[in-house]
Image (spheres, rainbow, N blue to C red):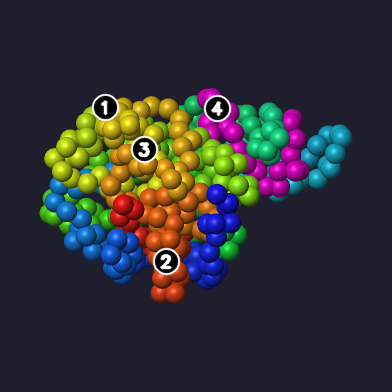
């Protein structure tokens, strides 16, 4: 398969820069075997069945984007300060984080960076060939966590940050109402549409939910640069499905309920945890599962997800789930009908290809 096979025309104006308000007023495209239905997220209880189980991702976005300056070098380079934007992507120890930085070319091992006017400092410990680097901070453990909370902002997708910067409301908007486990540098965006009122309506319908955890990494923002799908390498992300959670999921399916993944992160974790018969097992560790057309789904019966970008691994995933031709048709309808795309955009409820 070629990456170009997953391209489509998307007007830039349809990439959402702000969320729907209220959250569950976002539009919802129901993609069924017999056609497409235009709904809103608040209609979800009517589209699901009694006994269905929603599987949420309860990861919590950390304020992983830090702004600062590289301190002047005493020798061997530019003596001036340089403005630096850094996004923390993986904790490596009590005081060390792997990070992406802009402009990364202006940083080298041994440089010191002062964040938030010196409220937090770090030394560049090393730099990888792919441009990522390791920061060694001037504090550790809970002290470092508190400093990041105080100085950082949510790491919005780059296209939003470039277009309009950060709003104070992003700290709330770019977080699900059920977020609990700190560790993501990107939100599980399908979950952004849920409200307490929507959960109450789902319970009244007989639809319950269970939360698993997958910490979303910065790889979700990275474009696919390979021409052949087989040459793309997914970044690993850490996830957990406990024995109790696995038991709830398996019991719901045994009773005849459908497993409805809320977001591609929940789906990828469930498929990583399932055996060949579709039984979900306890899982703890990293997954780099890459789902493309031809994949045989084992654990998930329906998928609620946002609209994804052209040539992205996530558009490949939804094509695998519901069929490439059907999804291209659905996305053409979404573009023509003015649906909003990507992290703050609208949603679709997908039924699988048969």
Instruction: Note whether 123 is above or below 24 in the view shown.
Output: above
Mark before the other along the chain sequence, 4 or 1: 4
**Residue at coordinates 63% horizontally, 32% vertically from top-left?**
135
**Residue at coordinates 64% horizontally, 32% vertically from top-left?**
134
Q: Which residue is mark 2?
A: 329
Q: CA distance from mark 2 to mark 3?
A: 26 Å
Q: Nearer the viewer, mark 4 or mark 1?
A: 1
Q: CA distance from mark 4 to mark 1?
A: 27 Å
Q: Which mark is residue 92?
A: 4
Q: Quadrant of residue 131?
A: top right
Judging from the image, what secondary structure is the residue with disc 1 in?
helix
Mark before the other along the chain sequence, 4 or 2: 4
Extreme-right residue of the structure: 76
In percent of width and height, residue 247 lies at 22, 31
Residue 29: say if magenta: no
Mark before the other along the chain sequence, 3 or 4: 4
What residue range appears in magenta? 89-118
Instruction: Note whether 209 is above or below 10 in the view shown.
Output: above
User: Is mark 4 in CB contact (under 8 Å) with mark 1?
Assistant: no
Mark before the other along the chain sequence, 1 or 2: 1
Judging from the image, what secondary structure is the residue with disc 4 in?
loop
Q: Residues within 10 Å of mark 4 (few under 14, many from 20)?
A: few
In percent of width and height, residue 314 lies at 47, 50
Instruction: Note whether 192 is above or below 163 in the view shown.
Output: above
Q: Nearer the viewer, mark 1 or mark 2?
A: 2
Q: Which mark is residue 271?
A: 3
Q: CA distance from mark 4 to mark 2?
A: 43 Å
In percent of width and height, residue 263 lies at 37, 49
Instruction: Note whether 185 is above or below 194 in the view shown.
Output: above
Q: Nearer the viewer, residue 179 or 218?
A: 218
Q: Which mark is residue 251?
A: none
Q: Residues within 10 Å of mark 3 (few under 14, many from 20)?
A: many
């Amino acid at each position: 398969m070629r990456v170009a096979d997953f391209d489509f025309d998307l007007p830039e104006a349809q990439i959402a820069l702000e969320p729907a308000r209220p959250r569950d007023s976002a539009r919802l495209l129901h993609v069924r075997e017999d056609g497409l239905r235009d709904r809103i997220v608040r209609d979800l209880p009517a589209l699901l069945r009694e006994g269905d189980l929603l599987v949420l991702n309860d990861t919590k976005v950390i304020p992983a984007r830090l702004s600062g300056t590289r301190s002047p070098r005493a020798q061997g380079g530019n003596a001036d300060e340089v403005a630096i934007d850094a996004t923390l992507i993986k904790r490596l120890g009590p005081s060390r984080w792997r990070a992406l930085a802009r402009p990364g070319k202006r940083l080298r091992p041994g440089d010191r960076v002062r964040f938030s006017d010196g409220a937090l400092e770090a030394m560049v410990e090393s730099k990888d060939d792919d441009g990522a680097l390791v920061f060694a901070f001037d504090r550790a453990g809970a002290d470092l966590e508190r400093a990041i909370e105080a100085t950082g902002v949510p790491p919005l997708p780059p296209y939003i940050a470039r277009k309009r910067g950060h709003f104070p409301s992003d700290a709330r908007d770019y977080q699900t109402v059920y977020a609990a486990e700190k560790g993501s540098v990107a939100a599980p965006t399908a979950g952004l549409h849920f409200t307490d009122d929507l959960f109450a309506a789902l319970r009244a319908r007989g639809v319950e939910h269970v939360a698993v955890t997958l910490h979303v990494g910065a790889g979700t923002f990275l474009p696919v640069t390979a021409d052949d799908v087989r040459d793309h390498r997914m970044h690993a992300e850490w996830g957990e499905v406990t024995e109790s959670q696995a038991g709830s999921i398996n019991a719901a399916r045994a009773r005849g309920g459908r497993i409805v993944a809320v977001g591609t992160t929940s789906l990828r974790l469930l498929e990583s945890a399932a055996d060949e018969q579709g039984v979900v097992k306890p899982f703890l560790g990293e997954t780099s599962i890459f789902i493309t057309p031809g994949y045989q789904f084992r654990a998930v019966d329906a998928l609620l997800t946002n609209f994804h970008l052209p040539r992205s691994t996530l558009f490949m995933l939804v094509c695998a789930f519901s069929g490439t031709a059907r999804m291209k048709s659905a996305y053409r309808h979404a573009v023509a009908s003015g649906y909003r795309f990507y992290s703050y955009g609208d949603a679709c409820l997908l039924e699988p290809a048969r």
